[in-house]
Image: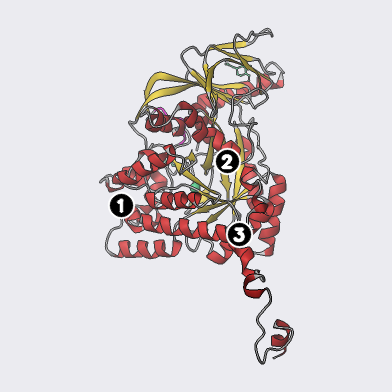
Amino acid sequence: MTPRTPVLLLGRCLALLLLTGAASGEDILIRGGTVVNADRQFQADVLIRDGLILRVGPGLKADRPGTRTLNAAGKLVMPGGIDPHTHLAMPFMGQVTCDDFYTGHAAALAGGTTMHIDFALPVAHDLLAGWEEWQRKAQDAVMDYGFHMAVTSWSAKVAADMAELTKKGVNSFKFFMAYKGALMVNDEQLLQGLRRCKELGAIAQVHAENGDAVAEGQQRVFDAGITGPEGHALSRPAALEGEATARAIRLAEFVGAPLYVVHVMSRDAMEEIGRARQRGLRVVGETVASALSRDESAMWDPDFDRAAQFVMSPPIRSKEHQAALQAAVAGGVLQLVGTDHAVFNSTQKRVGRHDFRIIPNGVNGLEERLHVVWQELVASGRVTPSDFVRLTSTAAAQIFNIYPRKGVVAEGSDADVIVFDPAMEHTISAASHHSAMDTNVYEGYRVQGKVVTTISRGRLVWHEGRFNITRGSGRFVPTPTHGPLFAGLERRAEPEQALLDAARYGGVPVRRAGDQPGGSDARDEL
Ligand SMILES: *[C@@H]1O[C@H](CO)[C@@H](O)[C@H](O)[C@H]1NC(C)=O
Ligand SMILES: *[C@@H]1O[C@H](CO)[C@@H](O)[C@H](O)[C@H]1NC(C)=O
Ligand SMILES: [Zn+2]
């Protein structure tokens, strides 16, 4: 995808400025706004210097010449969004997602997101090769990013490479329970992976759908003559998402590992997470902007291009599921909102014109997420602005163990800050978005409120509708292992430990007439 020319030119000019030293970090003073953090909101100015938040408090003065002062009266000053779930420049189903680390980041910044955690995929099941590949892709980054790594097979090398990756700053590994014959792992592999994650203090993530049943369902729907995008919705019902979510939860419980369920799209999966949390398990539920605001009816649109845009997995579901997920986010059953931003343009989606099974999966959202969550949950009165910050930023920073460097407007934190004008109405459209996509699943969606300014590590990168970004200026943010989900975990007893609980019924193996002394050794000699 060719980036938009003005952005590119501005980027080049800036690079020159940087070379001559002219751009070595101006101070930014945000005055008169309401700072909103996950714990509270309060009136304060924010002074930014050298990429960090230097001061937060009333009546701050610009004490350096050339300080850029922004008037935030009537506006909210919040930590930049952190999208925990994206796929930039990802090869998938024979195509490559058309937002890369440059266009995707520009889009994100325009929508108030200042960091994301992307899913690196192994190359031919090789995790370290995947890591190298995603390092290359990220050379164009214009904002901060982290990586999760997918685990698509199991071997001693995979286990060793996982440890190696944690040293490089990856603290989360994703297992696909769907995409049979491609990315999917079976239960045995998932169990090994869960144990290894626990050992390493890394977060195990699952894409929870029953891949075997999905493959069967797809075949049945296709054989029945339904070949269009609606077949996608029909072939992988919510029950299959609920089943895999429950299975992953029970297996994680068995080995005593915390579990993170990505893109919860249905009431079925959400309720499994709710039950698990009520049973005291450390299960995190992430939903995505599309699940909170779009519904499956679009996949029945007679226009293939329109219908195909909505194809992602697990599928976007009915309005009833949408309402249940909104309530679950508001009620704390689900802890954070990502996007699963994985964009394939109309040309790419048309590959599946006559077979929904090969429509590349994915919808946009990296640029829209904050606005959609605000509109659906804050503008409707369901959650407070502080909840909004928690759902879109703070929770991700805490779970992935980079808080309070990210996820809060506080002294010493990275200066990833946005200014939000709750009075400015706008309408989302492919004609005005900044992604490389030619379509937008939020086309025509009206939002009460808008991100007017985005500051990324102290740089004013988006302001009053203009970018000032530099290719390659984004940095990898290492995510350390043993985050909050692991605190005190060693004191919990997991069912797996009880397998060898010799104390039960007398504390020794039962000896029976004819048993050989020495157990398994004796059996080996037979
Ligand atoms: C772009 O940002 C740099 C600092 O990163 C600043 O020096 C420069 O003046 C900005 N350019 C514009 C047009 O605002
Ligand atoms: C979609 O992306 C492909 C690959 O980058 C490109 O060749 C094609 O022209 C794009 N199509 C549209 C409609 O943007
Ligand atoms: Zn995804």
Between the C-alphas of marks 3 and 1, the distance is 42 Å
Residue at image mark 2: 117
Q: Residue at x 38, y 40 (%)?
A: 327
Q: Amino acid at mark 3?
A: Glu
State the extent of the magenta-drawn residues as a range: 432-436
Coordinates of residue 300 in the picture (x, y in percent): 27, 48
For residue 230, the mark is: 1
Q: Is residue 492 above or below residue 325?
A: below
Compare marks 3 and 2 and give the one earlier in the sequence. Answer: 2
Q: Position of residue 287 (x, y in %)?
A: 45, 43
Residue 56 x %, y %: 62, 17
| Residue designated by label 3 | 494
Q: Nearer the viewer, residue 438 or 249?
A: 249
Spatial CA distance of label 1 from label 2 is: 30 Å
Q: State which tag comes first along the sequence, 1 or 2.
A: 2
Going 44% across and 33% down the picture, which residue do you hit? 368
Residue 295, position as x, y percentages in the image: 33, 43
Left or right, residue 488 beside residue 443 = right
Disc 3 and disc 1 in contact, CB within 8 angstroms: no
